Image (cartoon, grey):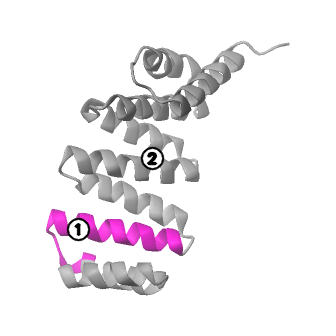
C-alpha cells in the first residue's frame, strides 16, 4: 500500500489531482489498516481540495481525524479539518469536532483554537450565551494565546454581545 501512497503523493506534487484521487479511492476500498487509511485519507483530502471539491475534502479531513491515533496526529488533523469545515460553514460539524478535540488538546495554542472554534460555531448557531460562557470567556484566561487567536476571540465576543443586546 505504501507504493500507492507514494504514487498518489507524487501525482499531487505534479498537480494531477484526479489521478491521485483515483489511486487513493481504490486503495481505501482494499485496506482496513488504520495507519494506512489515515495516510490515504490525507492524500484524498488534498486531491479533493486541488479539484475544488471542498465539501468532499472537509469530509475526508474529518475521516482522517477520526482515524488518527496519536495526539500529534489528532492535533495536526484537527487544524486541517477545522479549517475545511469552517470554509464550508458547517457549524454543527465544527462544534462537534471542537467538542471532541477539546478534552485531548494539551498545548495552549491548540486548546485556545479549539475553544475558539466551538465558540465560533455556537455564535453562528445563534447560541450566544453558551458560546460566551462555555468557550469564549474561558479562552481569555489562557496563557500563551497567540495574538491572531485573541483577535478572533474578541471579534466573536463582540458579536455575541451585539447579538444579545440588539439596538432597537
Q: Which mark is residue 126?
A: none
**In-image side of 57 versus 100 (left or right):** right
In the image, residue 85 sits, relative to residue 110, either above or below, namely below
Viewer-nearest residue: 111 or 41: 111
Query: What residue is shown at x 47% (from left), y 71% (from top)?
Result: 48
Viewer-nearest residue: 75 or 167: 75
Please provide the residue range marked out in magenta: 28-50
In the image, residue 99 sits, relative to residue 138, either above or below, namely below
**In-image side of 47 versus 161 (left or right):** left
Disc 1 element:
helix
Total marks shown come to 2
Q: CA distance from mark 2 to mark 1?
A: 20 Å
Quarter of the figure with the C terminus: top right
Query: Would residue 34 be counted in the magenta stretch?
Result: yes
The spot of residue 42 in percent (x, y) is: 34, 65
Is residue 1 in view?
no
Query: What residue is shown at x 21% (from left), y 43% (from top)?
Result: 71
Q: Which mark is residue 82?
A: 2
Is residue 84 in view?
yes
Occupied quadrant, residue 40: bottom left
Query: What residue is shown at x 47% (from left), y 85% (from top)?
Result: 16
Occupied quadrant, residue 30: bottom left
Amino acid at each position: 500500500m505504501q507504493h500507492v501512497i507514494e504514487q498518489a503523493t507524487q501525482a499531487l506534487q505534479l498537480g494531477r489531482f484526479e489521478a491521485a484521487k483515483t489511486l487513493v479511492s481504490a486503495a481505501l476500498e482494499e485496506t482496513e489498516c488504520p495507519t494506512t487509511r489515515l495516510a490515504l485519507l490525507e492524500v484524498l483530502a488534498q486531491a479533493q481540495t486541488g479539484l475544488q471539491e471542498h465539501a468532499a475534502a472537509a469530509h475526508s479531513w474529518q475521516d482522517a481525524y477520526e482515524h488518527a491515533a496519536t495526539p500529534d496526529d489528532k492535533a495536526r488533523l484537527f487544524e486541517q479539518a477545522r479549517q475545511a469545515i469552517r470554509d464550508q460553514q458547517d457549524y454543527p460539524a465544527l462544534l462537534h469536532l471542537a467538542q471532541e478535540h477539546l478534552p485531548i488538546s494539551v498545548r495552549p495554542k491548540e486548546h485556545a483554537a479549539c475553544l475558539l472554534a466551538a465558540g465560533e460555531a455556537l455564535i453562528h448557531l445563534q447560541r450566544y450565551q453558551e458560546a460566551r460562557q462555555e468557550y469564549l470567556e474561558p479562552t481569555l484566561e489562557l496563557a500563551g494565546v497567540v495574538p491572531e487567536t485573541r483577535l478572533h476571540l474578541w471579534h466573536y465576543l463582540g458579536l455575541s454581545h451585539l447579538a444579545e443586546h440588539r439596538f432597537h
